Image (spheres, rainbow, N blue to C red):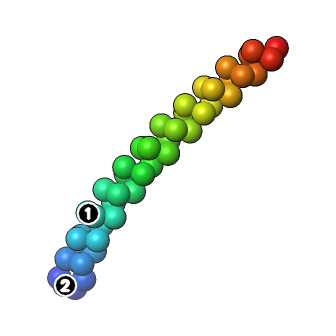
Amino acid sequence: MTRLEQLIRVRYSSVGNYLVYTYTAISFFYTKQQLMHSNDSSDKE
């Protein structure tokens, strides 16, 4: 169990950090696109 826990911790720390950074970047770009889309729609109107 200890070995498994260690593996999970190591994997989680590396993959977890990667996922956090990826999620932050994706959410940032998504919000930016949403703002751009809303600006486009308001321009068309």
> What residue appears at the point 48 percent right and 37 percent down from the top-left corner?
28
Element on which disc 2 rests = helix
> What residue appears at the point 24 percent right and 78 percent down from the top-left corner?
7
Q: Quadrant of the N terminus?
A: bottom left
Tags 2 and 1 touching, CB below 8 Å:
no
Q: Residues within 10 Å of mark 1 (few under 14, many from 20)?
A: few
> Extreme right residue here?
45
**Number of numbered discs present?**
2
Place residue 3 in its image quadrant: bottom left
Mark number for residue 13? Answer: 1
The image position of residue 26, as x and y in percent, is: 49, 45
> What residue appears at the point 67 percent right and 20 percent down from the top-left corner?
39
Which three-letter amino acid code belongs to the residue tagged 2? Arg
> What residue appears at the point 26 percent right and 63 percent down from the top-left corner?
13
Mark number for residue 3? Answer: 2
The image position of residue 17, as x and y in percent, is: 31, 56
- Residue 4 vs 35, above or below: the answer is below
In this rendering, would 41 be left or right of 25?
A: right
The image position of residue 15, as x and y in percent, is: 33, 64
- Residue 34 vs 17, above or below: the answer is above
